[in-house]
Amino acid sequence: MNNPQYQAALDAVKTAQKIVIVTHVKPDGDAIGSALGLAWALQEMGKQVTVANDDIVPDYLQFLPGTHLFQRTLANAEWDVMISTDASDEPRTGQVGAYARAHSQTVINLDHHITNTLFGDIHLVVPAAVSATEIVFEWWQFAGHPLSKNTAMALLTGLVTDTIGFRVNSVTANTLRIAQVLMQAGASLTEITARTLDTRPYRVVDLWKHALPSVMLEDGVIQGTVQLTDVSQAGLDDVTDGGLVSFLNQVNEAMVAVVFKEQPEQKVEISLRSKPGFNVSDVAFALGGGGHKQAAGATVNGTLDEVKAKVLPLLKDAVAAGKLDIV
């Protein structure tokens, strides 16, 4: 995993004419940023590029140049190379991922999750990277490809969002060096931070009004619940917590935060966050999900009560096994 096949990946895209890029469903800033960063750079190399995701680009990321390139379906096409970015396994890429894999000669797996299953033919999997966009950056530096402003904007967005504004303990001096290079290429740290971390629509605040009465703290685990009725009352189309889990993780006495989001057909999506020194990725992986030590998630079959009874003991064990690592 720690030896990315940059040359093999470069050779594959150099000889390719048609390339398709997919990323994980319910995309976040790193998913969209890494896909767009690749798309812009490959187009600048003269390649025919298709970008796809089952879901729409979130509103808060629509400011990025090129979001109009995303397609939600794929059909009647073949590609020389498929690049999967920021997805730890094949199902995470959804229907467009399944179609692209079946209709591409070579699959490049670009990801930074330690839970990556190493699918595909060429692996750019670097768990030590703080974001998938960091791997894209290192790949294009290896290739000697110049950074356009559009590429830099996309890559810095992934870097900022996956580190929550450079505030997780995986951030290193090299992370800040990369950010500096991207800023020198024209990316605005001020704009990206303001648009991705410091903004939310009123409907999300309305959702929080319904969800906050459910919040409880016990044994270092703080939990909240978003029910389907909360989502509809707030006028939202998709089940989300609107960043509530990150807000709860700021509570001093909480080492781990979880938000249970009720889904149709007796499924519950869980979002997990933790303080440095506490690992929630193992819990997510045990539940069929994945992510990072401090930010992870999964979708679990069952009612809210059934899923809570299964998940909360695991999170309390994670608290007991950890130690706060803030210097």
Image (cartoon, rainbow, N blue to C red):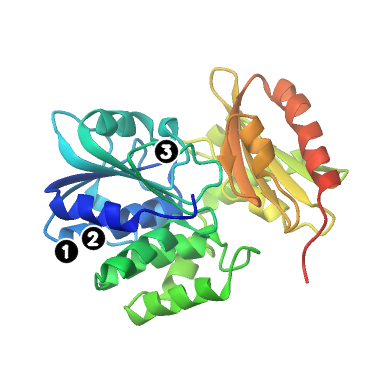
Identified by mark 2, the residue type is: Trp
Q: Amino acid at mark 1?
A: Glu
Which label sits in the foreground, 3 or 1? 1
Dot 3 or dot 1: first in sequence order is 3
Image quadrant holding the C terminus, namely bottom right
**Residue type at numbered disc 3:** Val
Instruction: Give how far apart the Cα atoms at labels 3 and 1 are.
Output: 26 Å
SS for callout 2 = helix
Q: Residues within 10 Å of mark 3 (few under 14, many from 20)?
A: some
Residue that mark 3 sits on? 25
Secondary structure state at the residue bearing disc 3: loop
Q: CA distance from mark 2 to mark 3?
A: 21 Å
Is the residue marked by circle 2 packed among few (<14), some (14-19), or many (20+) residues within 10 Å?
many
Q: Are marks 1 and 2 in contact (CB under 8 Å)?
A: yes
Q: Which residue is mark 1?
A: 44
Nearest the eye: 148 or 260: 148
